[in-house]
Amino acid sequence: MGQVAEVYRLLGADAVYVSPKAASWLTQDGGKLPENFWQPQAEPISRIFEVSGRRVGVVFFRAAPQTATRSTTSGNTGSSVKSTLPIAQRGPLTEAELASHAAYLEEAAKCGRQLAPQVDLLIGVSPWGYRVERHFIGQTPGLYHILLGGGSGLSFPYASTEGGYPLIWSRPYPEGRSVNLIKLYEWPQPGISQWTPEISFGADFEDLGSSIPSDPEIAGLLPQY
């Protein structure tokens, strides 16, 4: 394993979904991706993890064509940021976009429905971009508990939809400039599709700026950086 991939393996993550661009960067020195790192495939990838005696299901959606959107962020760059954007007014998908994404959306919904009865918490991981994810949320109410977004579009620790918080939707800031943090204070209740901010969950992000001290062990692994 190359040095760059080794550093990320040391993070001890249970599952990592990387874009082709990120995978290329991680393996630039001839290394291979760690076993628990996945790239978008021709079909969705489903996994079940044991966490605190509960079962957590994760569905990694397959890559779909990117829709036209402007990459931006919501809120400010401080802590405890919540999006107050009028999501319903951010431009629905066109008929052509709906047609090109129909199979991807149905696959992700089908995988979620198959996995849901087997787990206590269901998480979707998407590379689709803001607008497609927003459409998917509207078409699958109550299916996924958490959607970790990716691709182009708005960024936020979490955001509400027209129905409040039927799921926790979190999207990262561009180019790895921060880490989104989601803390669950309780497990989802069967038959109840609603989260309450600061009561059942909390969401924030860690700004990866110069204020974070360098770790000597990691710095020693990557002296060229």
Image (tube, grey):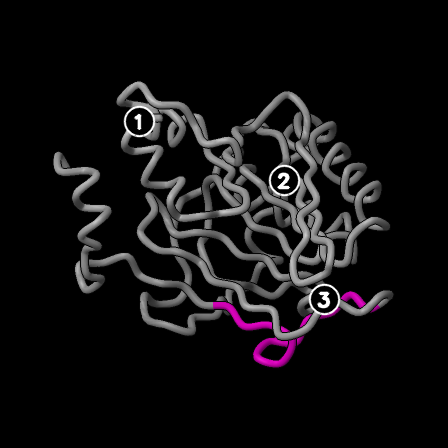
For disc 1, the marked residue is 2
Pick whichever of labels 1 and 2 is earlier in the sequence.
1
Distance from disc 1 to disc 2, alpha carbons, whole Å, reads 41 Å
Residue drawn at (44%, 26%), measured in percent from left and top? 20
Examine the rendered structure and indicate whether residue 10 appears above or below residue 80.
Answer: above
x, y percentage for residue 172? 44, 51
Q: Are marks 1 and 2 in contact (CB under 8 Å)?
A: no
For disc 3, the marked residue is 163
Q: What residue type is labelled 3?
A: Gly
Q: Give the range drawn in magenta.
A: 192-203
Residue drawn at (29%, 23%), measured in percent from left and top? 28
x, y percentage for residue 60? 62, 37
Q: Nearer the viewer, residue 207 or 10?
A: 10
Mark 1 or 2, which is nearer the eye? Answer: 1
Q: How many marks?
A: 3
x, y percentage for residue 195? 68, 71
Name the main secondary structure of what is drawn in magenta.
loop
For mark 2, does the 10 Å Cα neighbourhood hold few (<14), some (14 to 19), or many (20 or more) residues?
Answer: some
Please say whether residue 145 is one of the residues in the magenta stretch. no
Examine the rendered structure and indicate whether residue 110 appears above or below residue 185.
Answer: above
Q: Which amino acid does label 1 sit on?
A: Gly
Please say whether residue 201 is one of the residues in the magenta stretch. yes
